[in-house]
Image (cartoon, rainbow, N blue to C red):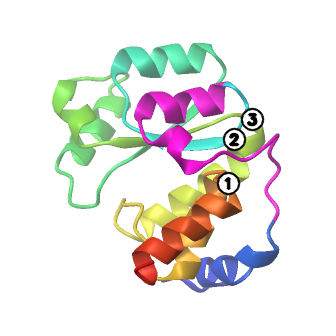
């Protein structure tokens, strides 16, 4: 784990995201719920799987999108090649099955790229190995302190 990410995780207890409100994690258990909470302005950043039509629709509604590839993904190279040729190229449906997306509104850009950097350091996955990492990711995704602590207690302390 990089020093920068460690420092950010260490600061999570004092960190206050710029959000209209925070959500209970249960509002984002599905991709549709996760998307809707960002569209409604309840939070600034979400993590979802999308189809090409959804990508176009969300962009037209003013959301920004960052594709996240698992490091081991063979599709990643094909996607990069298709972008350099000016389109989706030959990637097709396979690309979407192996890719997730960080969606964010204009207020969420910093947090979206923090989440991207965090995932990049974990080979393209949202995975946490400590309670503080779980708290950090939960804050970036705009979850309520209560939801985050319930997750931490359940997954790290068996409660």
Q: Residue 106 carries which label?
A: 3
Q: Which of marks 2 and 1 is in front?
A: 2
Q: Is residue 129 visible?
A: no
- Left or right: residue 15 versus residue 145 is right
Q: Which residue is drawn at 68% across and 76% down?
A: 8
Please say if 90 is above or below 80: above
> Which badge, 1 or 3, comes first in the chain's sequence?
3
Q: What stretch is highlighted in magenta?
A: 16-39
Q: Quadrant of the C terminus?
A: bottom left
Q: Magenta includes 68?
A: no
Question: Which residue in the structure is indicated by mark 1?
Answer: 111
Which residue position is annotated with label 2? 44
- Image marks 2 and 1: residues in contact by CB distance under 8 Å: yes
Write the residue at 33% across / 23% down: 51
Callout 1 environment at 10 Å: few (<14), some (14 to 19), or many (20+)?
A: many
Q: How far apart are marks 1 and 3 (CA)?
A: 10 Å
Instruction: Indicate the secondary structure of the residue bearing disc 3.
Output: helix
Q: Can see residue 22?
A: yes
Disc 2 and disc 1: Cα gap in Å? 8 Å
Marks 1 and 3 in Cβ contact (< 8 Å): no
């Amino acid at each position: 784990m990089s020093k920068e990410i460690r420092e950010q995780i260490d600061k999570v207890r004092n960190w206050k995201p710029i959000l209209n409100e925070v959500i209970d994690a249960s509002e984002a258990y599905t991709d549709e719920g996760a998307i809707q909470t960002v569209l409604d302005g309840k939070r600034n950043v979400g993590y979802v799987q999308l189809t090409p039509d959804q990508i176009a629709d969300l962009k037209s509604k003013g959301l920004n999108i960052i594709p996240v590839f698992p490091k081991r993904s063979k599709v990643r190279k094909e996607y990069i090649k298709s972008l350099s040729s000016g389109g989706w190229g030959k990637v097709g449906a396979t690309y979407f099955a192996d890719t997730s997306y960080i969606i964010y509104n204009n207020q969420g850009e910093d947090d979206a790229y923090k989440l991207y950097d965090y995932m990049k350091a974990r080979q393209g996955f949202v995975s946490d190995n400590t309670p503080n990492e779980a708290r950090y990711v939960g804050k970036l995704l705009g979850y309520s302190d209560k939801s985050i602590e319930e997750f931490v207690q359940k997954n790290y302390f068996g409660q």
